[in-house]
Image (cartoon, rainbow, N blue to C red):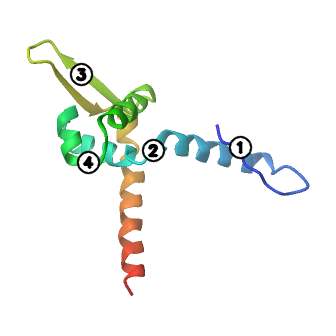
Amino acid sequence: MAKFNFKLNAPPPPETREDICSLTITQNVLQGRWKPLLIWYISLQPQRFGELTRLLPGISKGILAKQLKELEDDGLIQKEIFDELPFKVEYTLTTLGEQLLPVIAVMQDWGKKYINSRQK
């Protein structure tokens, strides 16, 4: 977990430490350039690895695999392996992952406002 340097003579009050800890956890779970986009695309429909590489031009297969594994380990997505040939795997959001969708929607809205403010 990240440590914060407060440059204060006294440590922050306990309620502030709790807020920072919660924010740090959220930051750590979403850390990674592609994770919010992965969550967003997987929320639209179950996605296969190959489709995610097409949806995210510029992502390497190694980074995609790593970030999918991290999202799975954090309980935000689940991987379903189908017993068929050719090998088929689909990623879907868990209930916990679905709870992040409002956060991602707010990030998307803020991004639109930021773009508009910078174009003026």
Report the residue that reaches farthest toward the bottom: 120
Amino acid carrying label 4: it is Leu
The residue pinned by badge 4 equals 56
Q: CA distance from mark 1 to mark 3?
A: 36 Å
Badge 3: residue crowd in 10 Å (few <14, some 14–19, many ≥20): few
Q: Nearer the viewer, mark 1 or mark 4?
A: 4
The residue pinned by badge 2 equals 32
Badge 2: residue crowd in 10 Å (few <14, some 14–19, many ≥20): some
The image position of residue 20, as x and y in percent, is 67, 48
The residue pinned by badge 3 equals 80
Residue 1 as seen in the image, left or right of residue 97: right
Amino acid carrying label 3: it is Glu
Please, is residue 98 above or below residue 82 in the view?
below
Q: Are marks 3 and 2 in contact (CB under 8 Å)?
A: no
Name the secondary structure under disc 1: loop
The label on residue 3 is 1
